[in-house]
Image (cartoon, helix red, strand yellow):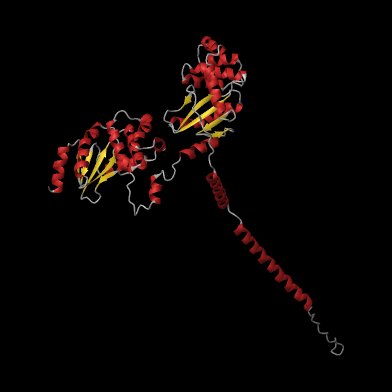
Amino acid sequence: MSKKNQKKSAPKKTQKKSPVKSNLLWLEIILALLIFVAGVIFVNETTKNQPTDEKISKEITEKKLAEKEEIAFTRIEIPTAPTSLPRLGKDGALLTAYFLADYQSEAEQKFYLETLPKLRKYIDDGTLKIYWVNSDTEDKLSYQSAMATKCTQRYSDEFFWKYLDAFYTRTLPLEYKDLLSVTRDIALNEYFFARCVTRDIYDAEVRAEAEFAQSLGVATPSFILDGIVFTDLDAEQILWTIAELTKPENPTDLEDYLESENTATTPKLLHEPAWGNPSAEIQIVEFCDFGAEACRDLQPAIAHLKEKYSDQVYFKFYNLPLSAESEILAESAECAQEQNPEVFWNYYNWLFVNQGKVNLENLAKSVLGLGLQPRAMELCLTKKRYAGEVADDLAVAKRLKIDSVPTLCIDTDCLKGTLTPDDIDRILKLKLGN
């Protein structure tokens, strides 16, 4: 092609972007970023303010505790009960309960078969005793069932509870022929039992119990614990109430009491009973077992020491029980110290005077004349509040390699065996340089 005929190509035109469209695009990007940032902030704040499982659990627990603290037990007055009532539990039990029975209710049957076994641990450890009360004489079957229990009880309380074990496994209510079948299950004399029931031999006892139950003014069946009435027979509520009634109360718990009284300015020894002069140069420690005759034989020397040298020595007492029985006595001594440090020494002497006659069954009842509260003593022993302190005393003895009683440590000299008042005089004459 010739240069003449060749045409110049037209230059390409550049398209200009619309300023309106460009601005919209930036706005969309900025808006998207703002939405994203706002979303992140919202999620973070929501997560931060959302209660965790731990926080929720804590709030529920605190609410429950607050509800428990607000509970005030309402009690009814219990009049003198008939002596004919059968009982589960020990004489010196801390808590007393009554169960009102008409022998017709499934709730009553459920209480006996399901709830009562859960209370056994408190019955066995001396915390709780339960009296079973016939409460209805109007209904024929209730009256007949009550009469049957009395006819069984005449053999023993043990047979009474054995009878109820079989009675409550049946479908209630039970007719007369069913009552006879229960006696066959527990090998009672059916002929004498039948005569007893049909002739109403224990009518007076049955009616006296029913009058007692009616005087309480509560529905049947009911469980009455320390005057607190449970008509719904809820096992968990009953167990919780027992725990509340038997827990240490301030200032009954001397440790809490001493802390509140500022022990730094008012030093009091919790489980180291002491007498004498705290500033004395000579310190004497007795390691003793309240059940040991040798420790009892040492007491004339201790009495002489207290009478003649109380201004010149400082005397401390440590438990060193060498048997399970002695551990109970040691714990009871700590319980006495808790109630009244001054009365402790009366109790200390009383234990030695009555050595061999004191046990867990009669111990709490015997302290009233000593200026101690039997109920507080029962609670203290039942909860084994000072088992740890007794164990601490044993640990001290072990550390000092003391393994026999009595042992009397005068300063650094630990003397084993029974000493006489003359022995005390000779030793202290040397120690005091007289």
> Residue 331, relative to residue 189: is it above or below?
below
Q: Residue at x 53, y 17 (%)?
A: 204
- The answer to which of 85 and 187 lies nearer the viewer is 85
- Res 117 seen here: yes
- The answer to which of 371 and 405 lies nearer the viewer is 371
Locate residue 129, reporting x and y percent.
Answer: 47, 29
- In which quadrant of the rendered image does the N terminus lie? bottom right
Left-right relation of 113 to 294: right
Locate residue 289, reporting x and y percent.
Answer: 28, 35
Left-right relation of 257 to 42: left
Total number of numbered labels?
A: 0
Locate residue 134, reporting x and y percent.
Answer: 55, 23
Rendering quarter of residue 361? top left
> Residue 181, relative to residue 400: is it above or below?
above
Residue farthest bottom in this picture = 4
Rendering quarter of residue 419? top left
Residue farthest left in this picture = 434
- Res 166 seen here: no
- The answer to which of 154 and 309 lies nearer the viewer is 309
Residue farthest top in this picture = 191
Locate residue 358, reporting x and y percent.
Answer: 33, 30
